[in-house]
Image: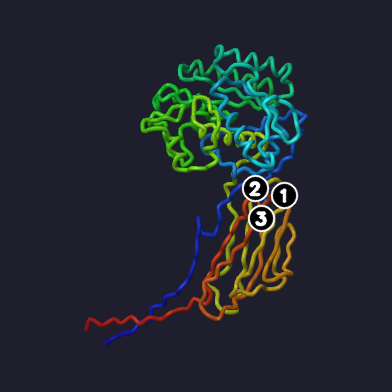
Amino acid sequence: MIKFFNLILVLALLVTLNGDIVTYAATPYQAVGLSPSTVREAPDPDVAQDSPAQQAIIIDHTCTDLSKIPEYWIEQAKAQLRLCYGHTSHGSQPVSGMQVLMNNTPGGLYDFNTTGAIEPGVLSLDDRTPAGDLGNPDRVTWEARTRTHLGGPGSDRNVVVWSWCGQVSSADEADINTYLTLMNGLEVDYPSVSFVYMTGHLNGTGVSGNLNVRNEQIRDYCRANHKVLFDFADIESYDPDGNYFLDRGADDGCYYDGGNWANEWCAAHPGDPLCDSCSCAHSRPLNCNLKARAFWWMLARIAGWDGPSESAPQKAASIVTPVYGQTVTYTIVAQRFTAHPTATVALTDEVPAGLSYVSGTLSATSGAWDDSAVTTLHWTGVLSSTPAVTVTYAVTVSAPASQIITNTATIAVPGAQPLTCTATVCANCYTLYLPLALRDSD
């Protein structure tokens, strides 16, 4: 005797990306909703501001991609910040790279001067002022020179940067504690000034060498005490692809036990702007160009940028296997972008073939929406402190046959590439009945 059973196989499509809901990776200048901490009044550049370092700002090799920084925050850095930068030859590397970046960027976005003059649209950087560096002529004179400068000709400065030459290599724990104590004392006495800590440049002694031990001492202190750190050594430890060279004896000239990582990377990437020629003291142009980009990243953070968003907008369909005539609601959640709160963001959603828009269903939790040009739906909004903005609308399935339908929304944010957000459904995915024959054991 043969018994027939029906095995029900439901064909369904549920497309996921980075989790349970289709999302896209957040990039800078993305914003429809901001966390309250992101929204700030632009400080008056003529009024001293409180230090923004409510948590540690660590500037390292992960902070060199300028495309992640909203242009607004570069402009704010130029408008708000007035720097003095004490250094000798090694410390000139970021400035050398900044000169190249300024000269090769049309429109003046990265314009700066080295005289400390205050000019519209130009970063004021009083270079090599005060004179010397963190270890020249000794380990304490820089602090006295800082106080003298801030109490006199540099009284208008609100960011103070000092770099090392080679003195971290020979420092012991007490020497670095002296540095950290003096820096902290300056921060206490000048609360409206941002003081930038630095690590010492690489010297080829690797992970276990005294230099790295002392640099780790500086890093640990900055992380634990919410300081601003420009991690000079970390930037020298990686190429732009993230390959690590400190454990291979990398030095400040980008040499390691197998060659020169800067020369090798630029040979493999001819014409890349990171390899633009510059006079880079003790090193290769790539090193200076990376430090320049990290320096602007640091300035944007000090000016108020929260860094790249960690949350991504989402788009989802209420039903992923709808049938003909069934209603599906699409929900788009845009949140935690890092664009300026006065920027206008525009969302466009083209309803694809196989779906029919249900008139009047487009709505949003804020902003303005327009469904008069069906099948194209529009939403625009000015950023606010609202944590997220939700846009919804309904469609009915008009496709008569089985069809995979991908629905994509495009978000335009000033100063950034258009962003996309996608959800996919499988319309009319049929239920199939396949016979499964089983024979009795008797």
The residue sitting at the bottom extreme is 1
Judging depth in this view, the residue of 116 and 29 nearest the camera is 116
Looking at marks 1 and 2 on the same chain, the residue that comes earlier in the sequence is marked by 2
Q: Quadrant of the N terminus?
A: bottom left
Rendered position, 214 above or below 404? above
Q: Residue at left 69%, top 22%? A: 190
The residue under label 3 is 412
Q: Amino acid at mark 2?
A: Tyr
The residue under label 2 is 29
Check if mark 1's residue and mark 2's residue have beta carbons within 8 Å. yes
Q: Position of residue 225 (x, y in %)?
A: 57, 28
Q: Amino acid at mark 1?
A: Ala
The residue under label 1 is 343
Looking at marks 3 and 2 on the same chain, the residue that comes earlier in the sequence is marked by 2
Is residue 56 among what the camera can see? no
Horizontally, residue 110 falls left or right of residue 215, namely right
Q: Secondary structure at mark 1?
A: loop
Check if mark 3's residue and mark 1's residue have beta carbons within 8 Å. no
Q: Amino acid at mark 3?
A: Ala
Q: Position of residue 64 (x, y in %)?
A: 55, 38
Rendered position, 25 above or below 210? below
Rendered position, 372 above or below 157? below
The residue sitting at the left extreme is 442
How busy is the neighbourhood of tag 3: few (under 14 within 10 Å), some, or many (20 plus)? some
For the residues marked 3 and 2, what is the alpha-carbon distance in whole angstroms?
Answer: 10 Å
How busy is the neighbourhood of tag 1: few (under 14 within 10 Å), some, or many (20 plus)? some
Q: Position of residue 273 (x, y in %)?
A: 55, 40
Q: Secondary structure at mark 2?
A: loop
Q: Quadrant of the C terminus?
A: bottom left
